[in-house]
Amino acid sequence: MEFLWRQNANLVMVNGTATRQEKAMLYLTRKVGESVMLNENVEVTVVAVRGRTVKLGFVFPPEVSVMRREIYDRIQEENRAAAAMTGTLVDELRDKGK
């Protein structure tokens, strides 16, 4: 098994302030049928490779959430928009009560 570590630096917002967050990315070379364990309860297996597409299989307990990154990002974006709207709505209702 080959592997490579790469450092990623991301900016994240913490209490309205941009903060630099260091993350490490591990690159692994796996063949069809080979797996990787995450912690002790998640197994990721390479099921198939067709051209530039890799099919992965996941075995995980029910309390673990697994979703495609683009879906996760969309949910986070919608949550931020809803939170911002809720604050604005509360302010509007408060102003109407004055």
Image: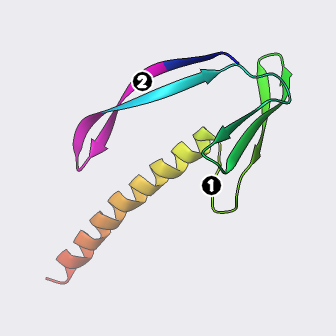
Q: Which residue is mark 1?
A: 65
Give the spatial CA distance, label 1 vs label 2. 23 Å
x, y percent for residue 2:
66, 15
Dot placed on the residue nearer the N-terminal end, 1 or 2: 2
Which circle marks residue 54 in the picture? none
Q: Is residue 10 magenta?
A: yes
**Quadrant the C terminus occupies:** bottom left
Along the line of sight, the residue nearer the viewer: 79 or 28: 28
- Magenta region's main secondary structure? strand
In the drawing, does residue 47 fall left or right of residue 10?
right
Q: Number of marks in the image?
A: 2
Q: Residue at x 72, y 43 (%)?
A: 43
Q: Secondary structure at mark 2?
A: strand
Above/below status of 41 relative to 29: below
Q: Residue at x 78, y 26 (%)?
A: 54
Q: Is residue 16 left or right of residue 64?
A: left
In the rendered structure, the answer to whether residue 90 lies left or right of residue 9 reads left
Q: Which residue is mark 2?
A: 8
Relative image position of residue 91 (x, y in whole percent): 23, 70
Extent of the magenta region: 6-20
Amino acid marked by disc 2: Asn
Classify residue 94 by image quadrant.
Answer: bottom left
Residue 41 or 15: which is nearer the viewer? 41
Above or below: residue 47 compared with residue 62:
above
In percent of the image, x 67 and y 51: which residue is there? 41
- Residue sitting at x 59%, y 39%: 70
The kind of residue tagged 1 is Ser
